[in-house]
Amino acid sequence: MNIRTGNPTLKNTTFDRFRGQGLENGMTIQGTVNKTLLLLLFLMITSIYSWNTFSANPSGASLLMIGGAIGGFVVGLVTIFIPKISPITAPIYALLQGCFIGAISAYYNTEFEGIVIQAILLTFGTLFSLLLAYKSGWIKVTQKFRLGIFAATGAIFVVYLISFIGRFFGFTVPHLHEATPIGILISVVIVIIAALNLVLDFDYIDTGAKQNVPKYFEWYAGFGLMVTLIWLYIEILRLLAKIRSRK
């Protein structure tokens, strides 16, 4: 039985049709790491630009934020359905998301000075800590583990979708966006689920390398890891903002 990872971009069944083909130039872990670093560089470039734009022209930065979010979502969907074009779409996704990340980070930083650095350090600290835990075997990716993270991630998506639609009808999900003790607890749970998706991403990359799937999956796996990292960063940023607003 194949269970999807919590991250919708990365799922175990992706590699099924390539298993046993013995490709000479297939996906490797080092290749995936290199592609992921390139994607992070692309994201950083547009993030800096968007951040600086916010300082000089907040309304212009808002357009970058909205355009980056919508454009990134569309390009992300295309990448999910057509992994073969990920060498093209993954960098575009990173550039667009950088526009979104830079602007929204600048906004949070004006409200809570220093919060962005804290969120970045916590995001990458979580990444490397969980990578160490995965490589050391402290966290084992079992079918039950996959199913649990997939179910929890799906539940979070549904709640966010209800919250988004509810705004058009004057309805809000209680505590979800509030700095109440329950609201902070909800954010903590969401951060934990987002972080555990990283473990599934590591397992996906490890599986792809062992099965020697086509080289373009390095870009696709890097893209999937970026999706999780961006989600984790945003959730940590929101959690810190809730905590800081209560002081």
Image (tube, rainbow, N blue to C red):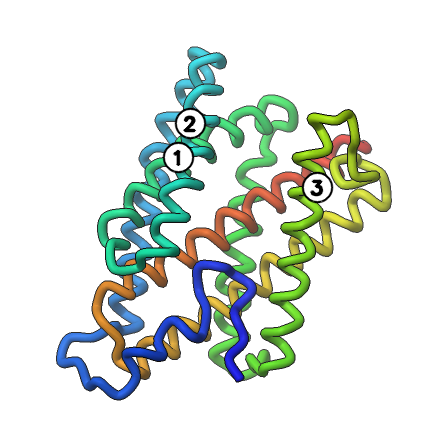
Q: Give the residue at the far right of this rendering.
A: 181
Q: What residue type is disc 2 on?
A: Gly
- Residue 160 lies, in percent from the top left, at 67, 43
Give the image quarter of residue 129: bottom right
**Residue placed furthest toward the front:** 169
Relative to 238, 102 lies left or right: left
- Pinpoint residue 239: horizontal percent, then vertical percent: 69, 43
**Are dots 1 and 2 in contact, CB under 8 Å?**
yes
**SS label for mark 3:** helix
Helix, strand or loop at label 2? It is helix
Q: Mark 2 = which residue?
A: 67
How many C-alpha atoms fall within 10 Å of the one at disc 3: few (<14), some, or many (≥20)?
some
Point out the tag, 3 or 2, that comes first from the N-terminus.
2
The residue shown at (67%, 52%) is 156
x%, y% of residue 141? 55, 79
Q: How many marks?
A: 3
The C terminus is located in which quarter? top right
Residue bearing the label numbered 3: 162
Q: Residue at x 51, y 60 (%)?
A: 7
